[in-house]
Image: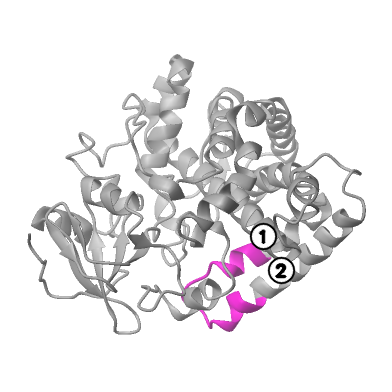
């Protein structure tokens, strides 16, 4: 059993200057060296990076690595991120058995059958946004004119959040996940969101039968019987809204750009709609937008494929590095929708695998099953070099995406 020992470069590190879709080139160097790489975090503390597909999956699937930020030595990306993660946790920041107990309260809401029943409504929203794009005329801005309105409306209707409040939670959610800012900015945004959902849940608790939505059902099934406290319900409402629109909106924009930069793949999809599901999985793999996911801390000494992580050592199991591992995916830096990579880790792995992935897939499949049919001549309205990418954000994406046709 080997204990890895390397120099300790600073993490996070910059992406490559060439292709904006590629993760930092250092990840390839680390992966080729074998085993974990020791790095230094913003606060001077050391941490291990795992970058191979096999190692990342091993860490994510091992409950001896804790996801609880309150655990001493838990690795932090920045002071701003720390400010948010030190708040009272939701189930995604809990370990078994508490994690499973809370997660099961939401599992039935995201079953494939329930999400499939939403597809006609999702498609109707998409078509109405296409109509608005056509009425506005070329050019349009894909992020704010399409992706965010779609995903925020879908999650609002699903949860039972008033549509008129969409802009509020979009802005506060954006501020909450910024990493390179004064910690007070995400802290204040988080407090505003908690205050908002506290009021919303209290209104639903007064008349939980008034509406058939996720939060009303949560009140009836979990809060009223005493299985979940009001405060825990508030925190989980905040989690579901944030996770339910920001990530998918960024993926829609990047997925559109993937196809525009690879017209052969666009032609393949248009010529063979049966490739749609695999195409969505390929863009999820290729972009891996939750770019700083996988923070863990060892609760005991753990061997990961022959490499020892000591109790109390922090690790990052990097999903975006694992999804570009040539040992798992041939030509991993190529966007290839015929690959259909159903083993990718974009939704994580193990007990913490993303609960909302059926909804994300339904939205992405609905968008990319119709976007280029409706706008076959869609193109970038500015040079690729003019786009601003979210390198320092927890969720990777593009700030704006001006399109023409």
Q: Is residue 108 left or right of residue 216?
A: left
Q: Relative to 321, is 356 above or below? A: above
* Quadrant in the picture for residue 46: bottom left
- Label of residue 194 in the image: 2
Q: How far apart are marks 1 and 2 (CA)?
A: 7 Å
* Residue 173 lies within the magenta run: yes
Image point (63%, 37%), residue name: 108
Image coordinates for residue 297, horizontal then vertical, percent: 33, 67
Say few, some or many: other residues with alpha carbon within 10 Å of mark 2 (under 14 / 14 to 19 / 20 or more). some
Query: For the image shown, how many numbered marks are present on the structure?
Result: 2
Q: Do the residues labelled 1 and 2 touch (CB within 8 Å)?
A: yes
Image point (29%, 84%), residue name: 44
Give, as a single range, the part of the protein colored magenta.
Answer: 172-188
Image coordinates for residue 40, horizontal then vertical, percent: 26, 77
Q: Relative to 117, is 317 above or below? A: below
- Label of residue 63 in the image: none
Image point (81%, 59%), residue name: 201
Q: Relative to 261, is 249 above or below? A: below
Image coordinates for residue 223, horizontal then vertical, percent: 76, 55
- For the C terminus, the quadrant is top right
Q: Is residue 35 left or right of residue 70?
A: left
- Determine if residue 19 is in view: no
Image coordinates for residue 322, horizontal then vertical, percent: 27, 48
- Determine if residue 62 is in view: yes
- Name the secondary structure under disc 2: helix
Say few, some or many: other residues with alpha carbon within 10 Å of mark 1 (under 14 / 14 to 19 / 20 or more). many
Q: Nearer the viewer, residue 109 or 171?
A: 109
Residue identifier under label 1: 238
* Residue 170 lies within the magenta run: no
* Quadrant in the picture for residue 214: top right
């Amino acid at each position: 059993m080997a204990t890895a020992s390397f120099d300790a470069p600073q993490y996070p590190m910059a992406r490559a200057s060439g292709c904006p879709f590629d993760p930092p080139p250092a990840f390839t160097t680390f992966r080729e060296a074998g085993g974990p790489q020791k790095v230094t975090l913003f606060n001077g503390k050391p941490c291990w990076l795992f970058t191979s597909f096999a190692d990342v999956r091993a860490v994510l699937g091992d409950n001896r690595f804790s996801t609880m930020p309150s655990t001493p030595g838990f690795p932090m990306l920045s002071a701003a991120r720390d400010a948010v993660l030190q708040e009272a946790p939701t189930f995604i920041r809990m370990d078994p058995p508490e994690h499973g107990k809370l997660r099961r309260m939401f599992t039935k809401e995201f079953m494939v059958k329930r999400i499939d029943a939403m597809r006609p409504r999702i498609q109707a929203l998409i078509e109405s946004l296409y109509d608005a794009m056509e009425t506005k005329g070329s050019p349009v801005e894909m992020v704010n004119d399409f992706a965010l309105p779609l995903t925020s409306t879908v999650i609002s209707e699903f949860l039972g959040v008033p549509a008129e409040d969409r802009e509020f939670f979009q802005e506060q959610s954006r501020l909450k996940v910024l990493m390179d800012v004064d910690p007070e900015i995400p802290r204040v945004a988080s407090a505003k969101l908690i205050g908002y959902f506290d009021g919303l849940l209290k209104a639903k608790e007064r008349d939980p039968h008034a509406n058939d939505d996720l939060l009303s059902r949560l009140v009836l099934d979990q809060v009223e019987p005493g299985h979940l406290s009001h405060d825990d319900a508030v925190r989980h409402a905040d989690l579901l809204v944030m996770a339910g629109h920001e990530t998918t909106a960024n993926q829609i924009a990047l997925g559109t750009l993937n196809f525009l930069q690879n017209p052969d793949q666009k032609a393949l999809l248009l010529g063979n709609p049966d490739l749609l599901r695999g195409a969505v999985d390929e863009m999820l793999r290729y972009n891996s937008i939750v770019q700083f996911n996988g923070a863990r801390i060892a609760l005991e000494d753990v061997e990961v494929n022959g490499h020892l992580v000591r109790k109390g050592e922090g690790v990052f199991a990097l999903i975006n590095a694992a999804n570009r591992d040539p040992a798992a995916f041939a030509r991993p830096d190529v966007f290839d929708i015929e690959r259909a990579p159903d083993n990718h880790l974009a939704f994580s792995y193990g007990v913490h695998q993303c609960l909302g992935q059926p909804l994300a897939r339904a939205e992405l499949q609905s968008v990319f099953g119709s976007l280029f049919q409706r706008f076959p001549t869609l193109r970038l309205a500015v040079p690729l070099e003019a786009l601003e990418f979210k390198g320092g954000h927890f969720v990777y994406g593009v700030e704006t995406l001006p399109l023409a046709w």
